[in-house]
Image (tube, grey):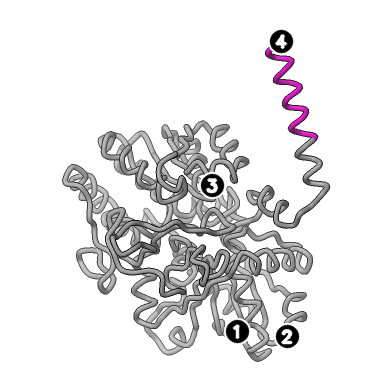
Amino acid sequence: MSERGYYGEFGGAFVPEILTATFDELQLAFETAKQDPAFWEEFVQLMGSYSCRPTPISYAENLTNRFGGARIYIKREDLNHTGAHKANNVMGQGLLVKRMGKTRVIAETGAGQHGVATATMAARLGFECTIYMGEVDVERQRPNVFWMERLGATVVPVTDGSRTLKDAINEAFRDWVSNMDNTHYVLGTACGPHPFPEMVTYFQSIIGTEARKQILEITGKLPKRVYACVGGGSNAMGIFSGFLADDDGDKRVELIGVEAGGHGIETGQHAARLASKDASIGVAQGYKTYFLQDGDGQMKETHSVSAGLDYVGVSPILAHLRDSGRVRFEAATDKEVIEALALTIKSEGLIPALESSHAFATAFKEAPQLSSDDVLLINQSGRGDKDIFTVADAFDDPKWEQFIIDKAAQYQARAAARRSS
């Protein structure tokens, strides 16, 4: 990375002049914290006592036997408090907010896990909290909205544009411009203006640090391949960070990022920025990377069965790693993802999030091609509880459908009774 926050030609900080001083303050606070060994120690201790770190690695014996080929291991970020890797970043940024003396945090969220994690951090550390969420995502991730509100956060549905993650990010930046004196924007992924890509990666690198040590202890070797889903890129950068050292051993570890193939790349209804030829380099939301945009620079509509992978851009760090050949990118379709999720549930008793299931889908395709001496490591970035409505609909479960009908009738009866009283 250069001094200006660039990774190759990607990154930078394209921010309005009014936010320059705020970004300078954040950069200074982050650099000072990084140089203080006590800060990282405080972070690790907090994650250990509050968020179940280190998360374990599980051997997927049944899946390994089913596919043959490589041995499949799973890094269990779903066991983090709040159910995903998101807690790593938000608790780290929360400690930074305390250092800066600010009293309010805001965040964007798509799948809702980052929103829940931010609301949890705010409750734990005593901050006022506002979460911006696209109206479409509010509807498909209602359980997470419920918990954010119970945790004391104000959830603001965003009705602009496609009403998904990119629009929630835009709205959060508008809030920050108006309230920068007392507010910190807890950006949830390794995107946005510098120093956010570096800062989010720094906190998420705890995944890779643990995973490298654990897989060596368990198998006696580094993995042949490491798989992670990619929306903005925070969980991928987290686990990839453990295998990016510039030595021969690490260079032999192949890193695979899996994006949302949606209904298929050929349909245009997907969110594959680096695994397709549909994206081009541009500047938006404060940084330079690959975006799904038209010839006029207008952002295209995206699609994914998972609310957390339909972002229109991607981490500038991952863009650089792709273009330099260090990370390979693939795309998994909605159909492949649902099939991989169903198989993982029945085979291992694990329920990965729809986002994580993209990584599983691609790993399952490739495992049979390898030797039984090879090790594959999949980052299960989150658990699938939040996806119950989407998954049940995809499975076309008649019992679930009847449950929803009955529950809706009960709510309607109670509402009618309240109106008549």
As drawn, the label of residue 68 is 2
Q: Which residue is mark 4?
A: 420
Give the residue furthest to the top.
421
Q: Amino acid at mark 1?
A: Gly
Q: Which residue is mark 3?
A: 112
Picture coordinates of residue 230, whole percent (x, y): 49, 65
Asked if residue 415 lies in the magenta stretch, the reply is yes
Q: Which residue is mark 1?
A: 220
Q: CA distance from mark 3 to mark 2?
A: 35 Å
**Labels 2 and 4: the sequence-earlier one:** 2
* Residue 343 in which image quadrant: bottom right
| Residue located 51% across and 63% down the image | 269
| Residue located 37% across and 76% down the image | 321
| Residue located 51% across and 51% down the image | 87
As drawn, the label of residue 267 is none
Q: CA distance from mark 3 to mark 4?
A: 35 Å
Q: Residues within 10 Å of mark 4 (few under 14, many from 20)?
A: few
Q: CA distance from mark 1 to mark 4?
A: 69 Å
Q: Is residue 91 left or right of residue 143?
A: left
Picture coordinates of residue 360, whole percent (x, y): 63, 70
Magenta-tinted stretch: 406-419
Q: Amino acid at mark 2?
A: Gly
**Labels 1 and 2: the sequence-earlier one:** 2
**Labels 1 and 4: the sequence-earlier one:** 1
Q: Amino acid at mark 3?
A: Gly
Q: Nearer the viewer, mark 1 or mark 3?
A: 3
| Residue located 37% across and 53% down the image | 39
Tally the numbered discs: 4
Q: Is residue 408 left or right of residue 138?
A: right
Q: Nearer the viewer, mark 1 or mark 4?
A: 4
Q: Amino acid at mark 4?
A: Ser
